[in-house]
Image (spheres, rainbow, N blue to C red):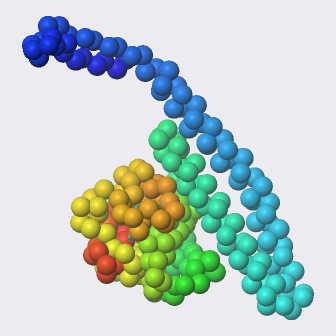
Amino acid sequence: VSLTISPIRDYNGSIIGISKIARDITERKREEKRKNDFVAMVSHELKTPLTSILLYAQLLIKKSGTVQDDTFLNMSSKIEAYVKRMISMITDYLGLSRIEEGKMNLQKTRFELDHLALEVIEEASLISSKHSLELVSSEGVWVYADKEKMRQVLINLVSNAVKYSPQGGPVILGCERVAGKAQIYVKDKGLGISPADQNKLFQRFYRVDDDQIKNISGFGIGLYLVSELLRLHDSQILVKSEVGKGSVFYFYLDLD
Ligand code: ADP
């Protein structure tokens, strides 16, 4: 129940009584849940046809070997990269509801993080023609983590670095062994973030209140998800940034 209490005043402004309005907000809460469930269902339904498109794009890539045509290979690879990006946006949204319901489980395996970083940077290069994407990595950065969740973390950070560098510019993904840990960072020379905003970035639905940023599409859930996924890995996302100069987002994982 939400309760609003306000004074009732006479012509002179003296308080002559109090009005109390009680509203039943159970229905509002129910409506909110219905809406969330609906969006989750739509997202889930979209994933099925997108996965089919992805499979066909991958078949086309295989076929391109037989037609010896670079344009054909290039276009099919772009379709693959864009569809993967769409699937990853949907995965983010579905992940959000899963985290809220406390149902996000990790499936940890031992894998080389530098290999995953290379996959992410190669894919991002296909759809970011204005930026030069670079990987700086050590070899054999073995970790014990949830590979697909780590992919989600890296994709979110790299696509933000690209999105928020509207003038183009270099984006570097680093994956190195530093002082007995795996150090991962994503560095851009884009818009940068003020100290006040840096404190709020990881809140759900938070977007910097700036005209330039509002023109760039986004939901404000990427960094929230990144920080939650890293928290589940006993890690933490950190940021250093300066307005007009660029940003670096970084975190550490235990080596395995
Ligand atoms: P979205 O990009 O969908 O808005 P995120 O949660 O990924 O959501 O990011 C939240 C906000 O943080 C963005 O709206 C943007 O204002 C800011 N931000 C994130 N990454 C960067 C970056 N690399 N450079 C500048 N601002 C960024």
In this rendering, the answer to whether 222 lies above or below 121 is above
Ligand 1 is located in which of the four quadrants? Answer: bottom left
What is the tally of numbered marks visible in this picture?
Answer: 0
In this view, the residue in front, 50 or 65, is 50
> What residue sits 29% from the left and 63% below the top?
198
In this view, the residue in front, 231 or 177, is 231
Q: Which quadrant holds residue 75?
A: bottom right
**Image quarter (top left, top right, bottom left or bottom right) of the N terminus:** top left
Horizontal and vertical percent for residue 209? 35, 59
> What residue sits 41% from the left and 68% below the top?
212
Lateral position of residue 43 relative to residue 233, left or right:
right
Lateral position of residue 195 relative to residue 141, left or right:
left
Horizontal and vertical percent for residue 178? 34, 80
In this rendering, the answer to whether 18 lies above or below 27 is above
Q: Is residue 35 among the parts visible in the rendering?
A: yes
In this view, the residue in front, 166 or 252, is 166
**Image quarter (top left, top right, bottom left or bottom right) of the C terminus:** bottom left
Residue at the front extreme, as displayed:
11
Residue at the right extreme, as displayed:
66
Horizontal and vertical percent for residue 45? 72, 47
> What residue sits 83% from the left and 79% below the top?
62
Horizontal and vertical percent for residue 202? 36, 56
Lateral position of residue 195 relative to residue 70, left or right:
left
Q: Which quadrant holds residue 74?
A: bottom right
Q: Which quadrant holds residue 129?
A: bottom right
Q: Is residue 183 among the parts visible in the rendering?
A: no
